[in-house]
Image (cartoon, grey):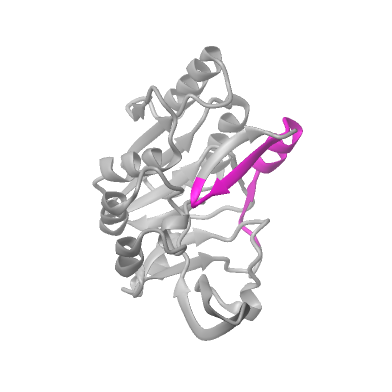
Amino acid sequence: MSTIDLCIVATRRPDLFAQTLESFAEKIFHKLDLRGAYLNLDPVFGTEDDHRACVEIFRKHFPDGTIFQPESPGFCAAVARLWSASSADYIFHLEDDWTSLKNMGRELLAPFSDDRIAQVSFHTADQNWNIRRKGHFHRRNEYTHLFGIKIPLFRTFPKFTTSPSLLRGDFARHCAGLMDLSRDPEKQFYSGVNPAMEAYVANRRNYIFSPEASPVIKDMGREWREQRRIEKVITNSTSVWRASA
């Protein structure tokens, strides 16, 4: 049977983290027979007490799991650190602010029977992707500019994500080794800032898991940030969180 390691990117938000783990434990984890669990807990947003609370929440679910607690936050560093630490056939990549909308299990691995598929990502409630019209492969159109006009080239390239998903372990570990830790990890797959990464993933596919052509998970972090007037700003493919005016 294929092995699966769980990799979780988290910050000091115990309220969200507890909801995320309870939701996924109830609806997904117990059906997958996870082998190892890895948590990267960045010192962002909360207090030292919040940090300790997140550790306790993780230990409640995974007493023997591995916890990385870097002194400085870094989203790309967190992703690369977790993916590099894994050794399983597949990685279940998760963030600390999602909830599962339905029960799921081993069927999540079925798309990997296609050798081209390197990632099976969850169809999210806020994802602008119509499964019935566009299909399950997440791709992006390629454009050029002529006299200031954006013109489609009728070519597409794969879009991979750092939102919750399952990835082939060897694929994720290789990507981790190619990442520029100063930039947003997701942008490096397709935005022109990491040619080596784009070349590596060019012939691979991201399959959006959506058996009923409807979302299967929901983002809780957006509302949490809006309530606290925190916004994500991306400049030159580098992400920064800051309080809005």
Could you say where residue 52 lies in the image, as x and y percent from the top left? 48, 16
Above or below 43: residue 182: below
Who is closer to the viewer here, 184 or 27?
184
Residue span colored magenta? 215-238
Residue 231 in the magenta stretch? The answer is yes
Instruction: Count the numbered circles shown.
Output: 0
Q: Is residue 168 left or right of residue 243?
A: left
Residue 162 location (% of width, % of height): 47, 51
**Looking at the image, which residue is at 72% across and 30% down?**
228
Give residue 83's position: percent from left, percent from top. Answer: 32, 45
Regarding residue 14, the answer to whether it shows in the image is yes
* Nearer to me, 131 or 162: 162
Q: Nearer the viewer, residue 44 or 53?
A: 44
- Quick check: 207 above or below 41? below
Q: Quick one: quadrant of the N terminus?
A: bottom left
* Residue 60: percent from left, percent from top: 46, 24
Residue 107 visible to an observer of this rendering: no
At 31% from the left and 69% from the top, the residue drawn is 199
